[in-house]
Image (spheres, coloured by chain):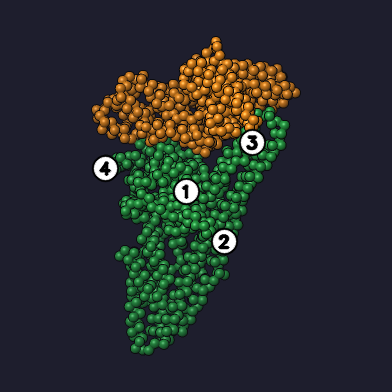
Amino acid sequence: MSRATRLSADRLLDRALQVYAGDPVAVARLEGHRRRLHEPLRVAVAGMVKAGKSTLINAIIGEEIAPTDAGESTRVVTWYRYGLNPRVTLIAREGEPRGLPVRRREGRLVLDLAGVPVEEVRHLIVDWPAAGLRNLTLIDTPGIGSLSQEVSARSVTFLTPEDAPSEADAIVYLLRHLHATDLRFLESFRDVEAGRSGTVNAIAVLSRADEVGSGRIDALVSARTVAERYRHDEGLRSLALDVVPVAGLLAQGARTLRQAEYAALAEIAALDRDERERLLVSADRFVRPVEGLRAAPELRRAVLERFGLFGIRLASVLLRNGITEPTPLARELARRSGLDPLLRILADQFSARAEQLKARTAVLGVEALLRERPVPEAGELTAEIERITSSAHELTELRLLAALRTGAAPLPDEARADAERLVGGSGVVPYQRLGLREGASEQEITEAATAALARWRRRAENPLSDRLTVEVCRIVSRSCEAIIASSAPAPGPALVVAAD
Amino acid sequence: MRLADLVTQGIALADEAGRSDLRKRLEQTRERLGEPSIRVIVVGEFKQGKSRLINALVGLPVCPVDDDIATSVPTLVSYGDPAGAVVVVPVEDGTDGEPVLERRPVELERLADEVSERGNPGNQRGIVAAEVTLPRKILSGGLTIVDSPGVGGLDSAHSLTTLSALPSADAMLLVSDASQEYTEPEIQFLKQALRVCPTVAAVLTKTDLYPAWRQIAELDRGHLDRVLPGIPLFPVSSELRTQAARLNDKELNEESGFPALVSYLRTQVLAQAEAVQRRAVAHDLVSVTEHLGLALQAELSALLNPERTPQVVAELEAAKERTDELRRRTSRWQLTLNDGISDLIADMEHDLRDRVRNIQRDVDEAIDSGDPGPVWDQLMEWLEQRVTAAASDTFVWTDERARWLSEQVAEHFSEAEVALPALPRSGPESGLEAVPALPELDPGHLGPMQKLLIGAKGSYGGVLMVGLVTTLVGMSLINPFSLAAGVLIGRKAYRDDKDARLRKRQSEAKSLIHKQLDEVIFQVGKQLRDRLRLVQRSIRDHFTAIADEHHRSLTASVLASQKAASLYAAEREKRVRELRAELKKVEGLRSQVPVEPPALARTA
């Protein structure tokens, strides 16, 4: 069904290209939209200053390439996309794109603008041969709430442009604790972007989760509780599909664990308890010269910077409890960092909807073009747009999801939760929609879907239901029908985009 | 001899002379000496480790600490033996709508349940404040540390609550953790706060956790210097301090950075406040001895030089006349005060209305450009923030103007102050001192919120901004748009009547918001007006009391002089001896009053 949506979007762009054939500016924009329709989904990573955006990007890519620093480091919007050869390109506001030298310091890229003033840079594109980027283009943005106002302004204009659809199809929003600024930003993102089509396409990440409990070993447990509270926060619910805690630093370290670091961690874990605790009292003490410790202070400093005190404490516990190899340690640290759930949600919510999200972006692009450069054939194109938006059930689902999340639909709580799940609020794979366990049999799925369909039809037929409820019921019923259709005899395998 | 003993002596002398007014003044002085209160308010965004900092300072987990939001009500920690805790709860008394605040003792161990977000979510119990007393050395000398809830972040409604508490604070600690340099809201808050509380120190917490804290400290140093050079910055680790206390580890304590902070609190904040305090007490004592001495001197002079008595009496009468002038409503200082306050109230109301009108214009524009239905909640939140910001600005501005006005009044009063008649003196030369620049007009008397923080007994008045903010938050819960979903789903269904409905919704939204903004102008305006009236009353009472004391002293002197003329020779000898003895006592007290160094200007 998503292929169909893309084909309609393709057709729409074809028609628009014919209509605007004599207008080179419009043609260029439409060509851009068409290219984009066939490229990986663009996910922007945004958030307040120092929320850990670059660190998280490194963790998702699985390689430490985005520059990070104790001070504010990201000052221009930077794209990370898949490419066979490493390449850095600077896209200026005016003039041709220009290549920049690929230089790395300690693995991280040194993004030197080659003398171009920051305000003239539209963005940087980093092509990188990392598997993690095959299905996803990640966009790093400067922090919001920076003391340098222009830096923040660059992010806001990029993500929520005044008059054009956003460059990003979806957004991962990092927050440390829910600030009013966060909500304001998410709102404005929804207002300009999703607001036009009434959909939600953001995921909130409670970042730097390891710092929640002052680096205590159970910090991530606490972080989960906090995330749970945010998940039920009315303000945030209507703006983001989900909230997950992620310890970005730990995830980044785990994904790029080196042998020397493993050796240092193992040595620290093997110390006797008193000695280890003395070492782990504070960051300052950890890097002091210690008699008889093979890991030199410089190495310990590096380990500390890459894993944080929490990461080192956690690694010590894991190593003392039977892990003896770097690979399992890395895997366990990554698992505990919360990165896996995030990747899964990215796959469930974004990758699985990639086609619709991109088609939606294309449709919005044509709409914007029609507004700006009206043509006599506008009526015809508008009708086409109308047809796509109403027939593409996935878009309707996203819209309904937004309505349900904002509490705008007049349903009792239980029914609302049911509807949310059925239209894909917790993931678009059938078992997720039906609230079944992973690997449920086809028969189970069909049965559950049929029951749901009956339930929602009954609700629609209830004479007391108002028009709005009936409309909601119609959409939900259609989602149920789609599930039944997809699990009917001799179906193709359900489309599942694996995490990573 | 200790100041307190001198004050007791002074009270005895005032009693002997039958001067109940002077006695009352010294009793107040004694009370202030006995319970000094130097308030240090700890502010910062949430999750920066404010409560943990206080716990580490006093070495006991008194303020609730949680991985999620912990502190929901302000907590005052001060000296007291034995340790104890009370929560302050408003109780409706039904007379004039202003709730009376009641103090209920709670067990110290259970305090966290009462005041934390966990035990008391959203502060359902409506607790206004908690007060903790502890027998800790650091708190001796009257240091009161105030933990403020940082729940909403500095850029939200709560910053107003914090801001309005600041004028009553002697110093402010701005807390931010070492995970990142200052953000824009923090610096904005600092700038505003500096206007109402000039003594500020910055504290960088959690240095144990972040290897790059030195770099962050440097960056912060730079940001601070750009705001105002010279604000001290203390990197600390509450965790290390707690561990150091547990292990009795001196070196670790040094590393925690706390010794520097503690010494700052003691030598800078506390010592400075104590100096101001001592100066005020010394001034009170000197002034009381002057008053007591005047009548004695006058009588003595009449006895020793009877031929000059008519002249002395005339001079005293003239001085009394001029003093009485000061007590009249038409005196210059009274006019300055009354006109000043009226102008200030008018200006404040205008300022507030102007700011709110701007907000209203923006909202109207926003509503006209779209459908307010689906974004109503967000709109309300936005509105609340803008209103808070506007009220904060008006508050800070009004506070500054009020302070300036009190200085003006003080100046006018002292200009008109009566020069005492030249009388022969038997002691060291001195005259009634001019009124100093309001040493005892404690800014703590100026507002209900301050009263709350001083922990004054009895009614706290309207719980100023706290109440105001909750009223506003409460109002935003009204949601009239039940049909809002019509826009989000099924656009086609409503196409025909969409325009009419939209227009209706827009006008409904506007009228609702206008009503709310009117309410804001009324509520905020009333609170600020009450506050200004309180300022006016405090200033008037202060100077009227001084003028009254003068009046009584001069009247007594005239009477004494006249009485002296009617005494027989034999009695004269005796009376002269008595008077000399009395005077000796008074002069004796006076000579013991320590000379304090001149006051440093409080404002930078």
Q: How far apart are marks 1 and 3 (CA)?
A: 34 Å
Q: Could you tell me which chain the residue with mark 4 belongs to?
A: B
Q: Which chain is orange?
A: A
Of circles 3 and 4, the one toward us is 3
**Residue type pointed to by label 4:** Asn
Q: Identify the disc placed on residue B340.
A: 2
Task: Respond whether the residues carrying marks 3 and 4 are from the same subunit.
Answer: yes
Residues at marks 2 and 3, CA–CA distance in whole angstroms? 51 Å
Indicate whether B287 appears above or below A29. Answer: below
Which amino acid type is shown beneath numbered disc 2? Answer: Gly
C-alpha span from label 1 to label 4 = 40 Å
In the image: residue B179, left or right of residue A31: left
Tell me, yes or no, whether dots 1 and 3 are on the same chain. Answer: yes
**Badge 1 vs badge 4, beta-carbon distance below 8 Å:** no
Of the image marks 2 and 3, the number of the one nearer the N terminus = 2
Q: Earlier in the sequence, mark 4 or mark 2?
A: 4
Instruction: Please check whether the numbered discs 1 and 4 fall on a single chain.
Output: yes
Mark 3 surroundings within 10 Å by alpha-carbon count, few (fewer than 14), some (14 through 19), many (20 or more): some
* Near-viewer residue (B341 or B234): B341
Give the foreground label among 1 and 2.
1
Looking at the image, residue A395 lies above or below residue B319: above
Q: How crowded is mark 4: few (under 14 residues within 10 Å), some or many (20 or more)?
A: few
Mark 3 to mark 4 CA distance (whole Å): 65 Å
Q: Which chain is green?
A: B
Instruction: Tell me which numbered mark, 1 or 4, is placed earlier along the sequence.
Output: 1
Q: Residue B248 carries which label?
A: 4
Q: Which chain carries label 3?
A: B
Chain letter, disc 1 residue: B
Residue at numbered disc 3 = B483
Question: Residue drawn 38% across and 21% down?
Answer: A331
Foreground mark, 1 or 4, reads 1
